Amino acid sequence: MSTRFTGKVVLVTGGGSGIGRATAAAFAREGATVVVAGRTAAALAQTVALIEADGGAADSAVADITDDEQVRGLVETIVARHGGLHIAFNNAGTVGKPGLIPDQDKAVFDAVVATNLTGTWLCLKHEIAHMRANGGGVIVNMASNIGAHGRRPGMATYAASKAAVSVLTRNAARDHIGEGVRINAVSPGATDTVLSRRPGETDADRDARLAEAVPLGRVGATEEVASAVLWLASDEAAFAVGHDLVVDGGVTA
């Protein structure tokens, strides 16, 4: 087990599945105490159990990142339980139902923006407030290769929300690096999670489709995205500030 993050307390939102779960496990394997947050207690408990079975230290907290008071309470709970918050991976997000703008309900737009943009903003608000008052810290936001880097038919709402996260990351990074808070983003392409499958599509169907669409010829692994997040969060990336790291097999190259 590596000790790269020994002594660090790490928050991973959306930690109950997919990239969030893989990243939480990766941080724990490298010595961190990881707190996974999300809206579903049972899924978070599964992540904690997997980490503990692997010899890591983990905790969970139920919170809705679209609610200001719940995010405030999440950070306060982590600090009370573990003595601080050193690293945050703001991973929670949603795709929403794809569709052309004239055909899409406003409720879909509101839900996507509330989670992907407002939720990330609220996490930044309360994480930065704690970190800048306690010696600094590191934040990685989840953006996407759909948005600032590329577009897809029927994905305008999602693309706009994730492009906004990319810009929010860069502006916040400039604002707070002087206070010791280093902020970056990661932008994955299609990754081996349920979000990469179209309705009714099997993993095999998805893999065949993406083998044609991705220059590398395959879907990404959650562990590959996790590795990028850990690098951005580590001292090895100390000179990376306001960067949006694309991990998509060459789709937007």
Image (cartoon, rainbow, N blue to C red):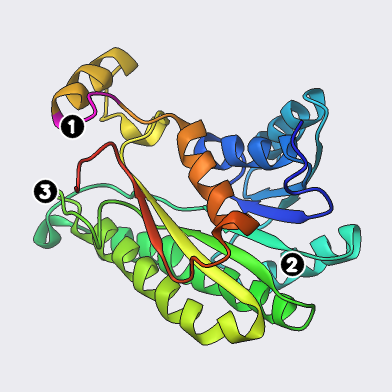
Residue linked to disc 3: 153
Q: Quadrant of residue 46?
A: top right
Which secondary structure lies at badge 2?
helix
Q: Quadrant of residue 139?
A: bottom right
Viewer-proximal residue among 3 and 45: 3
The answer to if 52 sits in the magenta stretch is no
Q: Residues within 10 Å of mark 1 (few under 14, many from 20)?
A: some
Residue linked to disc 2: 75
- Residue 107, horizontal then vertical, whole percent: 32, 62
Disc 3 or disc 1, which is closer to the eye? Answer: 1
Disc 1 or disc 2, which is closer to the eye? Answer: 1
- State whether residue 170 is above or below residue 13: below
Which secondary structure lies at badge 3?
loop
- Residue 43, horizontal then vertical, whole percent: 65, 35
What residue is drawn where x is 74% and y is 67%?
Answer: 75
N-terminal of the pair, mark 3 or mark 1, is 3
Q: Image quadrant for the N terminus?
A: top right
Segment tinted magenta in the rendering:
213-218
Residue linked to disc 1: 215
- Residue 215, horizontal then vertical, whole percent: 18, 32
Q: Is residue 190 left or right of residue 53?
A: left
Magenta segment's dominant SS is loop
Q: Is residue 28 visible?
A: yes
